[in-house]
Each structure stands twice: as C-alpha cells, then as structure tokens.
Image (cartoon, helix red, strand yellow):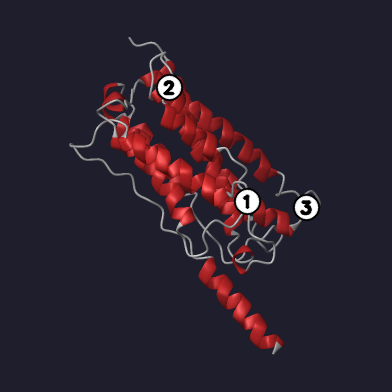
C-alpha cells in the first residue's frame, strides 16, 4: 500500500508539474499600440493560473506539484519580471505626466500581492483581479486607454528589467560555490532564474513589437533580435539540476545558466545606453 501511495503521489506530481507553453508575442496591423505588451502580461499570468497544477507557491509543502520541476520557484521568478512590466505600463507607458490609469494601478497593486498568501485574499484571487483590470485596459486601447512608446520609455523598461536580472545573476552565483548553498537551494535558484528568463523573453519580445519602428530608426533592430536570441539560449532544463564543482564530473547548471543570463544582461545594458544616447 505504501508503494501504491508513493506511485500515486509522484504520478500526481508529474501531472501537476506540466507547465503552460510560453506565449508568443502577437501583433497585427489592426491592433492598437500597447496591445502586444498588455496581452503578453495577461498571457504570462493566465498561463500560470490555468496550468495543470495551477498557482503553486501558496500550496502546502507536501503538494505533489512542488517536487519535480520546481514549478513554485519558476512561477515566482516569472512573477517578478511581470510585476516590473506591469509597473512600467502603469507609470510611463500609459501616461504623459497625467494621472495614473485606474485599471493599471489596480493591476499593479494586485500583482504585488503576496504570492504565497492562501486567503484574504488568496494569491490566485489577487492575480485573477489583476487579469480582469489588464483586460479592461487592453479592451479600451485606442479609446480612453493609451500606450505611449518612445526610446526613453523603452530604455527605462530595459534598465528596470536589467536591474532585476543583475540581482538574479548574483543569486545564481551564490549556488555555484560548494558549501554556500545546498543542492535543494540550488534547484530553487535555478528554477526561479529560469522562470524569469522565460518571462523576459515574452515581455521583451512584446516590447520590441511595440517599438519596432523606433528600433529600426535607431539602427538597433538587429541588436534587439540578438538580445532575444541570447534569452532563448537560456531556456534549457536538465532532467536533474546538479551543483557540481568546476573540476567535478557533474555539471553546475546554475553556473551555466548564469553565464547565459550574463550575456543577456550585457546586451540589455548596451541597448539601454544606446537608446539613451543623443542622436547625431
């Protein structure tokens, strides 16, 4: 009976750990400005809420979906970059010195709720409220809702996301030295960074669509595509995350991911600097 129970437990874990496919940025000529970025934020959050296991960071520690691909850490990492994009949408993409858009203000407030809270309100409830507010904003784009794209606004978004990625790189570096972080901690760090990388790929892809004319006019389109390509190379997922020494036979997956994300960070900072440079 114990073996049957264990088989059932890990069978449930396999089902609950099936994550949603990463959303692809979409834009058509009929879409108003802002539609691609707002849709990406919505799709990223909705994908985590509607995945097979749902939102896991606020579930009990013994929940089956916590133990295989570390979906809770992955979801927390993705939420961090989604919050930054939501804040950018509220603070400078949607206004020119005027009042904050009420739906974007509500969405950011709900995205900033404690992701581990299980009631009053639950994390799922707060994220659901954020989605409804973002959908209202998106539906009204071209009407009362606006999106203001510009080189300096894209620069601010890149700088904000680069700041978060810099902290994550340092966090990953702490798991690559023997004795400083255990193997379980290494797994948490790896999947948190992986969630951020997947979220960044979607968000930066959408932001690029919103600013494709600006990037082209500034000669930065190829550099932006190189940035996205470096992020794509970060999305690797080993069967087991190992924390080996440099001269050991096991890989150090955290360090491998850090190397890839550091390249992305370098490209993000370079693009931000060039967007902020004065024209000829």
Residue found at the far bottom of this picture: 1
Which residue matches tag 2? 92
Spatial CA distance of label 1 from label 2 is 32 Å
Closest to the camera, between mark 1 and mark 2, is: 1
Spot occupied by residue 172 in the image (x, y as percentages of width and height): 65, 45
Q: Is residue 103 left or right of residue 148?
A: right
Which residue matches tag 3? 178
Spatial CA distance of label 1 from label 3 is 38 Å
Camera-side residue of 175 and 60: 60
Spot occupied by residue 279 in the image (x, y as percentages of width and height): 34, 11
Q: Is residue 152 above or below residue 66?
A: above
Q: Residue at x 39, y 48 (%)?
A: 43
Quadrant for the C terminus, please. Answer: top left
Residue 200 showing in the rendered view? no
Residue 6 showing in the rendered view? yes
Q: How many marks?
A: 3
Quadrant for the N terminus, please. Answer: bottom right
Q: Is residue 218 above or below residue 258?
A: above
Structural crowding at the residue carrying mark 1, measured as other residues with C-alpha within 10 Å and reported as few (<14), some (14–19) or many (≥20): few
Which residue matches tag 1? 119
User: Of callouts 2 and 3, which one flags the residue occurring earlier in the amino acid sequence?
Assistant: 2
User: Of callouts 1 and 3, which one flags the residue occurring earlier in the amino acid sequence?
Assistant: 1
Residue 238, quarter of the rendered image: bottom right
Spot occupied by residue 36 in the image (x, y as percentages of width and height): 32, 38
Q: Residue at x 57, y 77 (%)?
A: 11
Residue found at the far left of this picture: 30
Q: Is residue 269 above or below residue 5?
A: above
Spot occupied by residue 115 in the image (x, y as percentages of width and height): 60, 47
Camera-side residue of 148 and 111: 111
Q: Residue at x 41, y 43 (%)?
A: 132
């Amino acid at each position: 009976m114990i073996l049957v129970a264990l088989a059932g437990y890990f069978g449930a874990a396999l089902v609950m750990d099936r994550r949603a496919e990463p959303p692809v940025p979409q834009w058509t000529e009929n879409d108003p400005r802002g539609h691609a970025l707002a849709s990406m934020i919505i799709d990223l959050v909705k994908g985590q809420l509607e995945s097979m296991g749902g939102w896991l960071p606020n579930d009990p520690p013994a929940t089956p979906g916590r133990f295989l691909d570390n979906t809770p850490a992955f979801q927390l990492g993705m939420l961090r970059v989604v919050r930054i994009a939501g804040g950018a949408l509220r603070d400078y993409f949607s206004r020119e010195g005027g009042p904050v858009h009420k739906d974007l203000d509500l969405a950011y407030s709900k995205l900033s709720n404690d992701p581990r809270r299980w009631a009053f309100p639950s994390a799922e409830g707060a994220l659901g409220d954020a989605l409804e507010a973002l959908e209202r904003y998106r539906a009204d784009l071209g009407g009362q809702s606006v999106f203001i794209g510009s080189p300096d606004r894209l620069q601010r978004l890149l700088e904000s996301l680069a700041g978060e990625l810099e902290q994550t790189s340092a966090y990953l570096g702490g798991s690559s030295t023997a004795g400083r972080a255990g193997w379980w901690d290494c797994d948490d760090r790896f999947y948190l960074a992986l969630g951020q990388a997947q979220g960044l790929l979607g968000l930066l892809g959408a932001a690029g669509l919103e600013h494709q004319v600006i990037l082209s006019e500034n000669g930065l389109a190829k550099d932006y595509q190189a940035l996205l390509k470096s992020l794509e190379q970060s999305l690797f997922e080993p069967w087991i995350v190992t924390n080996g020494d440099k001269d050991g036979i096991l890989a150090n997956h955290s360090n491998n991911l850090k190397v890839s994300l550091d390249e992305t960070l370098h490209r993000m900072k370079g693009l931000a600097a060039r967007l902020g440079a004065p024209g000829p």
